[in-house]
Amino acid sequence: GNLFAIEPSDDAFYFLNQKKINNVSLIKGKCPDNLKYNKKFDLICLFDVLEHIKEDKETISKLLEILKDSGRVFITVPAYQWLWSKHDENLMHQRRYSKKSLKLTFKDHNVTEEYFTYFNTFLFPFAVLDRFIKKISSKRISSTRNLNNKFPNRVINFIFKKIFVFEKFILNFFNFYFGLSILLIIKKKN
């Protein structure tokens, strides 16, 4: 199908335009300000986007205006505000979500929840331990040293990827009740 994308970053916008991807109309702008389309969409995807937008409820309202009746919105966001760290600040997040806080962004709209799950569950204990260690060690280490931007080595990255792929398989059979991220699919009522 034909895709429409909106990108606020000058660098990313330039990079995406250089790729010359067929069937994609790319607009330079940000949510909610530049969500003005003359058409309605069957599907809107916000994959790790909503947490970057200050006006999340206003963005959802505007997105639902351009969503067809019975259309769907797929959303993934980071979970649990108590996991907030320097990592979130470096990624320019505005917030992390819980099941309740994410659903509140749709509270006043004519939508139904079609699917909800936490994910990135198997890596959750490692992330909690990592955040705890960094909070303790940051009190002892000079603030000029940034421990939050180190990338794991390739072996660890490979292992994490395999764990993540395995979890994707498990999600075909049941949902998780906790995790590092949330997946929500909502459907606009007729």
Image (cartoon, helix red, strand yellow):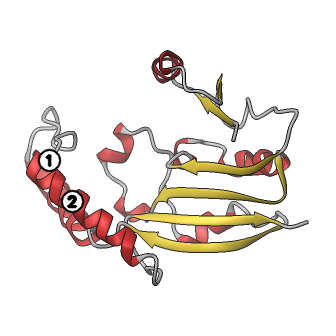
Looking at the image, is mark 2 or mark 1 earlier in the sequence?
1
Position of 168 relative to 152 (above/below): below
Location of residue 126 by image quarter:
bottom left
Amino acid beneath label 2: Phe
Position of 31 relative to 66 (above/below): above
Instruction: Looking at the picture, tell me which residue is in the foreground, 17 or 111.
Output: 17
Residue at 53 percent of width and 65 percent of height: 183
Q: In the image, residue 176 lies at what x, y percent? A: 43, 79
For the residues labelled 2 and 1, say whether their Cβ atoms are less than 8 Å apart: yes
Residue underneath mark 2: 160
Q: Which image quarter is the N terminus in?
A: top right
Residue underneath mark 1: 152
Q: Which image quarter is the C terminus in?
A: bottom right
User: Looking at the rendered structure, which numbered label has been put on residue 144?
Assistant: none
Q: In the image, residue 169 lies at what x, y percent? A: 37, 73
Q: Is residue 124 visible?
A: yes
